[in-house]
Image (cartoon, rainbow, N blue to C red):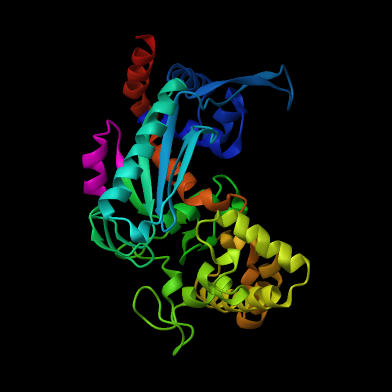
Amino acid sequence: MRSAKLSLVLRQLRDQGPRSRATLAAELGLTRSAASALVAELVELGLVRPAGLSRGGMGRPGTTVELDGAAVCGIGAEINAGHVATIALDLAGAVVAEHRVPLDVSRSSVDEVLDRTAELVARTDADVAVAGAATVGLTVGVAGLLDRPREVLTLGPNLRWRDVAVGTELRGRLAAAYPVAIENEGNLAALAEAVPGDPDRRDVLVLFGESGVGGGIVADGRLLRGHQGYAGEFGHMIVEPGGRRCGCGRIGCWETVTGLRALLDAAADPDDPLRDPALPLEERLAEVNRRADLGDTRTLAALDRVAGWVGVGAAILANALNPGVIVLGGYFAEVGDRLRPAIEEHLLAGVPAPQAGGARVELSTLGFAAARRGGALAALDAVFDDPTTVAAPRRAALAGGAT
């Protein structure tokens, strides 16, 4: 019961921002003395701190409190076709450490990729310790179809992985003192986009484009994983029978006409720098935008074609899910100003509900880091579920800093 009440207060501060003890008591149906005692305990745990004076309402101003991010961190990691990467976020969502290593995963052995991932996690964990915080958990996002109960990547078409026991393999390499979880990267990107406390982000459809196309579904604030955890594999909807063969082995999947390869193949010849995987993806997409701004007809035609196909798929999904927001993430966001008008037109034409069922299209501001940010947030969720779980890690971190 105590942990549940502490969780209630901590989540309220996360979702609604700084609050006085009196305001917390009123909003959560607590007595003022109970709210004050809970806040005092959260301060002792290093999760909450004084934030200033509240001047709203009648009477003397009260002291507000807010999340204190310094005590604990969650780590998110990502294994994608072109890189492995990590990020550490503190409880307030600030970045404490971030690392990214370019790696052609499809041409590397599974052992090499997992070794590099474990090295980055250990490096990030060391950065967290230097910052005087404790790591409370790690969530690793992988690109592909994940059997979540077994933590086995059953099929990763763009990684060229099949039946890889990612959870078991990583735990053996890390020997971590904190929980380690494995999740689909699209689901983690969706978690990162569903901002807690924002009523406009409770029904979100995230479309994430990179080597492949995937995403996630948040309905009424909850991530939808499906019966066996495979929800969100949008890239493998068949939209063009007789089209290009997909990495999954089927013909005409949505990602064959909307993925990064589809855009670059249409926009550039094989010897064009746009097609050079050795160049950072952000630089190549900036060049796509530059050429579009100059009116290059081939670039504009490629963007129009991809936008049309994204719109076709988005309309299908909007009819099924009726999201409030469709977030374009990954490379879709980088060229999103060019894609969005056509996508919106397809939504209006393809969704019979008035005004496309109220769905609006937004561009992600998280870049290519959305999945690993979502992983770090997922790891931190254990603290919001039970704030008392940080006591032991925090004591260990403080002891380590004293030696």
What residue lies at 48% left-to-right and 73% top-to-bottom?
A: 255
User: Would you say 352 lies left or right of 337 here?
Assistant: left
Q: Which of the pair 198/171 is nearer the observer?
A: 171
Q: Nearer the viewer, residue 53 or 391?
A: 391
Give the position of the C terminus as an image quadrant: top left
Q: Is residue 62 above or below residue 15?
A: above
Q: Which x, y percent locates residue 345? A: 69, 77
Residue name at image x 60 percent, y 38 percent: 16
- Write down the region rendered in magenta: 167-180
Residue 297 is inside the magenta segment: no
Placement of the N terminus among the 4 image quadrants: top left
Q: Hey, which residue is sitting farthest front in the picture? A: 271
Task: Please tell me in which quadrant of the rendered image residue 4 appears.
Answer: top left
Number of numbered discs visible in the structure rendering? 0
Taking the image as drawn, is residue 4 in sight? no
Q: Nearer the viewer, residue 145 or 379?
A: 145
Where on the picture, by quarter, is residue 230? bottom left
The answer to whether residue 367 is left or right of residue 144 is right
Where residue 247 sits, quadrant-wise, is bottom left
Q: Is residue 171 magenta?
A: yes
- Relative to 368, is 237 above or below? below
Q: Position of residue 259 (x, y in %)?
A: 51, 70
> Residue 278: horizontal and vertical position, in percent?
50, 56
Furthest residue toward top? 403
Where does residue 252 sit, x and y in percent of width and height? 44, 83
- Please indicate, yes or no, whether residue 390 appears anywhere in the rendered image: yes
Farthest bottom residue in view: 242
Which residue is depicted at the point 21% across and 47% down? 168
Residue at (34%, 44%) from the top-left corner? 116
The outermost residue toward the right is 294
